[in-house]
Amino acid sequence: MSKEHEILGKRVVSFFSSAVDTIVLIIFLAILVLSAYALWDARQVYSQADASNYQAYKPDRTEHLPSYNDLVAMNPDVFGWLQIYGTKIDYPLVQGQDNEKYLNTDPTGKYSYSGSLFLDSKASRDFSDFASIIYGHHMAHDEMFGSLDKFADREFFDQHQYGDIYYGNQHHGLVILGYIQVPDVYKSFVYQVPVYSDGAMGYYSAITQEALYMREEVDVGPNDHLALLSTCASDDNRRLVLVTKITDQTYPNTFGDEVNSGSGLQNVFNGIAGFLQQHRFIPLAVLIALILLYILMTRSKKGIKAERSAATTQQNRRKV
């Protein structure tokens, strides 16, 4: 009976050992599949947000098709174009009936996690209000309004002074006036924009005091018009706001294609670094998967050695 008990015990141990190996293998494969899906999904999100997707529709391009008018025909909510020189901000402007739709709808009208750059639903499309707010997601790789946080650096702020805004079939210049880090969107007067010129200067004085940087040498009067570019920050209630002044005078883009310059290898490394910074769970998941694989391989080797040892023992017993 002792020999039968020994055999039965070995079978039970072998069964549980195989079960553990199977469970470890399933967990390992699940982590790999989920990590691969997360990488693919994130890539899809950022590819949808890439400004290059819309360059063919940009106003005044020499190519005939497709055109800006084609984009407007595709989605009548498109009414303009916004570009901040020296950044990746170079997108169509839309305005919906509320401020919810274009959080997850692209300028062509399709669902997109990256959304669009959209003018506040209560603002005038001709920017005749003293101040108008344009919203956009803060995304990695400087997509959408992802580069607004760079203006917190004084040198970057000083080097980037102009942009262009197109509406009403006409280009207008943008002079970057200031940069604001709003601590709490629900308690800030920045979003309580005056429609008429009566409260214009009081509002402008207030945002000047709250701004991290302001170009005080630029004159702003009650009959001027401001465009405030707003995006979220790392905290739920914090916001980043770039204050610009709309002018009839347009300005040349002295940066050219500098924003997208750099070697292909450098761009790949920068993209990977930015992605991993935004998705820190993926390296951890891969590390766990590798540990599980190591455990599985170690157990497999021990199992093979045990089987060989058992086989050798049986052969020795037969010889005896």
Image: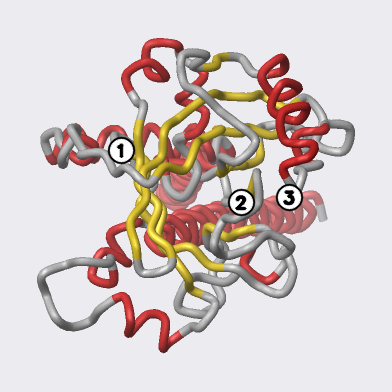
- Tell me which label, 3 or 1, sits earlier in the chain: 3
Quarter of the figure with residue 54: bottom left
Residue drawn at x 82%, y 30% is 184
- Relative image position of residue 135 (x, y in whole percent): 61, 51
N-term-proximal mark, 2 vs 1? 1
- Which of discs 3 and 1 lies nearer the camera? The answer is 1
**Counting other residues with Cα less than 10 Å from the Cα at mark 2, is it few (<14), some (14-19), or many (20 or more)?**
many
Q: Name the side, left or right, on which 110 lies relative to 159.
A: right
Task: Give whichever of discs 2 and 3 has the lower sequence position.
Answer: 3
Q: Nearer the viewer, mark 2 or mark 3?
A: 2
Q: Are marks 2 and 3 in contact (CB under 8 Å)?
A: no
| Rendering coords of residue 155 (x, y %) | 37, 11
Residue 286, compared with residue 9, is above or below; it is above
Q: Amino acid at mark 3?
A: Glu
* Residue located 43% across and 58% down the image: 49
Quickly name the residue at label 2.
135
Mark 1 lies on residue:
85
Q: Label 3 to label 1, Cα distance in Å?
A: 79 Å
Residue 73 x/y as whole percent = 41, 88
**Total number of numbered discs in the rendering:** 3
Give left or right: position of 266 versus 127. Answer: left
Q: CA distance from mark 2 to mark 1?
A: 18 Å
Q: Secondary structure at mark 2?
A: strand
Give the color scheme: rainbow, by chain, secondary structure or one colour: secondary structure
Residue 6: which disc?
A: 3
What amino acid is at disc 2?
Tyr
**Is the C-beta separation of discs 3 and 1 under 8 Å?**
no
